[in-house]
Amino acid sequence: SRAQGCEGKVLTVDTMNANVKKVEYAVRGPIVQRAVQIEKELKEGVKKPFNEVIKANIGDAHAMGQQPITFFRQVLALCSYPELLDDNKFPEDAKNRARRILKACGGSSIGAYSASQGIDCVRQDVSRYIEHRDGGIACDPDNIYLTTGASDGIVTILKLLTTGEGRTRTGVMISIPQYPLYSAALAELGAVQINYYLNEEKCWSLDIDELQRSLEAAREHCRPRVLCIINPGNPTGQVQSRQCIEDVIRFAAKEHLFLMADEVYQDNVYAEGCAFHSFKKVLFEMGPKFSSTVELASFHSTSKCYMGECGFRGGYMEVINMDPEVKAQLTKLVSVRLCPPVPGQALMALVTNPPQPGEPSYAQFIAEKTATLNNLAQKAKMTEEILNTVPGIRCNPVQGAMYSFPRITLPERAIKDAKGQVPDMFYCMKLLEETGICLVPGSGFGQKEGTFHFRMTILPPTDKLQTMLRKLKEFHQQFTQQYS
Amino acid sequence: SRAQGCEGKVLTVDTMNANVKKVEYAVRGPIVQRAVQIEKELKEGVKKPFNEVIKANIGDAHAMGQQPITFFRQVLALCSYPELLDDNKFPEDAKNRARRILKACGGSSIGAYSASQGIDCVRQDVSRYIEHRDGGIACDPDNIYLTTGASDGIVTILKLLTTGEGRTRTGVMISIPQYPLYSAALAELGAVQINYYLNEEKCWSLDIDELQRSLEAAREHCRPRVLCIINPGNPTGQVQSRQCIEDVIRFAAKEHLFLMADEVYQDNVYAEGCAFHSFKKVLFEMGPKFSSTVELASFHSTSKCYMGECGFRGGYMEVINMDPEVKAQLTKLVSVRLCPPVPGQALMALVTNPPQPGEPSYAQFIAEKTATLNNLAQKAKMTEEILNTVPGIRCNPVQGAMYSFPRITLPERAIKDAKGQVPDMFYCMKLLEETGICLVPGSGFGQKEGTFHFRMTILPPTDKLQTMLRKLKEFHQQFTQQYS
């Protein structure tokens, strides 16, 4: 009774999980792999028309030179090596925070597993933070789950929601352009991706008619159950108005959709007249008809905003109106992976419970936080302004988040010369080879057919960003000339 | 075109992912939930026949009072707060390790994302560690993937391997008793679990005839493709002989199975005459016929051994003979989650590249490591000895890992009185309520029908472990009397 297929490997690209094959993640795709290779070549002394690769492909603030918040790192050091609690060099409030976190850890060690849902006192910090953020609307720590970055929470909720086969398979509505974690997770889970298009002409705003169109079309072939929103937007940098959020919630209620709100850029709002409104707050301000029925999961992370601590993989999600039996299933599911990284949990406690007025670290904390956010706001503006001076590049205002997603006009001949390669991939690869600038092609996020874009972070230091934008301008002009 | 089922919640236990519902994870199951509740009751002053809950349910060394390795925590503090590099309090070798890790991080910050496969220099440390461990057999850092604990790597490899439908669905052979991460992951992925039974009479040894029996039976209804081994064993504490590993490899080669070797307890070997043999080493010593064909993934973690740093979620896997196209798919897949936690990666660098003779921290490191491992060896012996004095409890030697898995004889009337509850769950729940001792019922790991067990860690401090074993003995005697 020998099995078939005994020649060669057990695991080949033909016999592997077919869903995994469909996964794509452009933020670390072929352009980035080539960028890493080029960096190695530069180190080995290979001559290039540039001296360094500038990685504007990924929202990785520290890698671009942003400094960590001193207070956060002091507490993390104290938690890692509690002998430092006897050191006079550390401010008392940092020591107190470390003592509080350690007391909540098994054996007073961040090396112990925590509860699978996260450390109790950290979940309490998170819930007080949310209450404060949302003007006093109650938040139950029991609805908070700490996660391994926001991605972990997003995938977990999508996993719970994915069921059915064929025409009853779960459909998930995502914006186009989108952050490719979503398409990747849906491919892996075998859920149906339902595209709704953001309106580029209106600063990437979300249009309810378009939601309706996309939903109706999807109902022909799957069962739409989930609506995902990223606000502030990634890769598109728009900030949703309060009105729009209300409309989205009404739509979700009417169409019986589970709402997922990716709000990891909640502190990254730069444009005048824009403000961050959480889905939770708007939902509760709409009254009990909505606040007691609409199911919502909202996600946050330690990786973005002013802290940019991506490496710690800290995050949380809040679930609202989740069926108690499903919540028990969720708690069971996360317990299999034991717990999110405890240093990331500690960091989340600090982000949601930072130094308070009167505490010794307050002034420095506020100074550092403000400087970082001001610097980002300045770079957001500069990026938009310089890009819009280039004929053939049109850039919406970077109202928030960390990215611009300009539209680029590519000459017909360039599209032909790309020879099967996606034209904006061809463009970005050429840009990388000629200038060392590493961007992600718009096709990696999705875009209206026949349009081309790239995503560029605003994270490089101001002077480097300026140089980069100048080089990009030159490149675009040459490219256009060459292919016209 | 309104969808059906618009009443009530979008997400209910009836409309959720059915695979998730099948997931079970006893290590954090109902007994542990009740233990947490009892702890709260004790705090609130509720009278109980005991003063504290002793959690012997989970391999969480620090929570049981084991102290972290000083050197590791010094380096982690230095990495978290590099200002400490100017502090004379830290030994030079700790500073050098921190500098090396920071240099390998984007922007010299552990807050930056790393490469998705893990930081280059950490993967190099891991590969040198493996070469040294395996007597010089080469290890390519390209085959090393850093992970979020070992669990993450195990689930990722199982995910790649899961495919097909009905009779062609991937079958995965796991030992019974098993560590329930495996059954949980298989349930979630919808892969077929194939049980092979370890031989309790022969100290939980692995029998090739039993592998063959279980494989033949499984081929009737699925396509077996994977064989999982845990060595040293969890929950069973056995250490496999070199001969047995060779036989398993021959079997895998003959039957065309992908081998997964869970080797997270590789330093936890206590019994005389036992030694850890890695699957990698044995495979390569068997010559090119095997070493160039058998596909193997082996897993390690920072959570066990002498360091017990569970909270950092550090781990790695080494893949051998993996098809290059599949490897590219694996690298793509892990990139979606961006990277494993960087502090856990740093810790893995230290575990695999600890202080060397001649370095200032060497003596203390060796003293701490040795003391911890000797203490565990002593507790392993004590556990076996005391348990075997109890009529109705029979315990195999705890040769390695951190657990004993004794067989318990339950009176017929207790089995009847359990009323539908699994009898060893009934036993463990009663034990918890009466003594505060928290164990995991054998049914959570799987056991031969009609036999009953529990898993107990050997991690409590020696005096507490002794008290616990004494109480357990009394409880078992009373329980037996009560139901006879």
Image: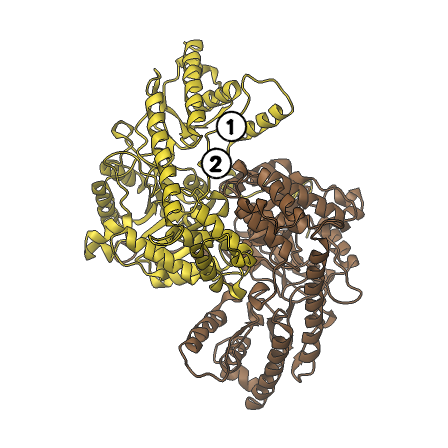
Chain colours: A yellow, B brown
* Image quarter in which the N terminus of chain B is found: top left
Task: Residue at 32%, 39% (x, y): give it.
Answer: A232
- Vertical arrangement, residue A335 with respect to residue B282, above or below: below
Q: Could you classify mark 1 by the number of other residues whose Cα lies within 10 Å: few (under 14), some (14-19), or many (20 or more)?
A: many
Q: Amino acid type of disc 2?
A: Glu
Numbered circle sitting on residue B118: none
Q: Chain of mark 1?
A: A
Q: Is B151 left or right of B394, judged from the image as shown?
A: left
Task: Residue at 58%, 48% (x, y): give it.
Answer: B87
Q: Is B141 left or right of A178, judged from the image as shown?
A: right
Q: Could you classify mark 2 by the number of other residues whose Cα lies within 10 Å: few (under 14), some (14-19), or many (20 or more)?
A: many
Q: Is B308 left or right of B12, judged from the image as shown?
A: right
Which of pointers 1 and 2 lies earlier in the amino acid sequence? 2
Q: Amino acid type of disc 1?
A: Ile
- Vertical arrangement, residue B443 with respect to residue A341, above or below: below
Residue tagged by mark 2?
A: A24
Q: Is B144 left or right of B132, judged from the image as shown?
A: left
What percent of the width, then of the height, locates residue B288?
79, 42
Secondary structure found at label 1: helix
- The answer to whether the residue labelled 1 contacts the one labelled 2, judged by CB atoms less than 8 Å apart, is no
Q: Chain of mark 2?
A: A
Secondary structure found at label 2: loop
Tell me whether marks 1 and 2 sit on the same chain. Answer: yes
Mark 1 vs mark 2: give the one in front.
1
Task: Determine the CA span between mark 1 and mark 2.
Answer: 13 Å
Residue B170 visible in the snapshot: no
What percent of the width, then of the height, locates residue B62?
58, 63
* Image quarter in which the C terminus of chain B is found: bottom right
Residue tagged by mark 1?
A: A31
Residue A32 visible in the snapshot: yes
Query: Residue A145's quadrant in the figure?
Result: bottom left
> Viewer-proximal residue, B303 or B423?
B303
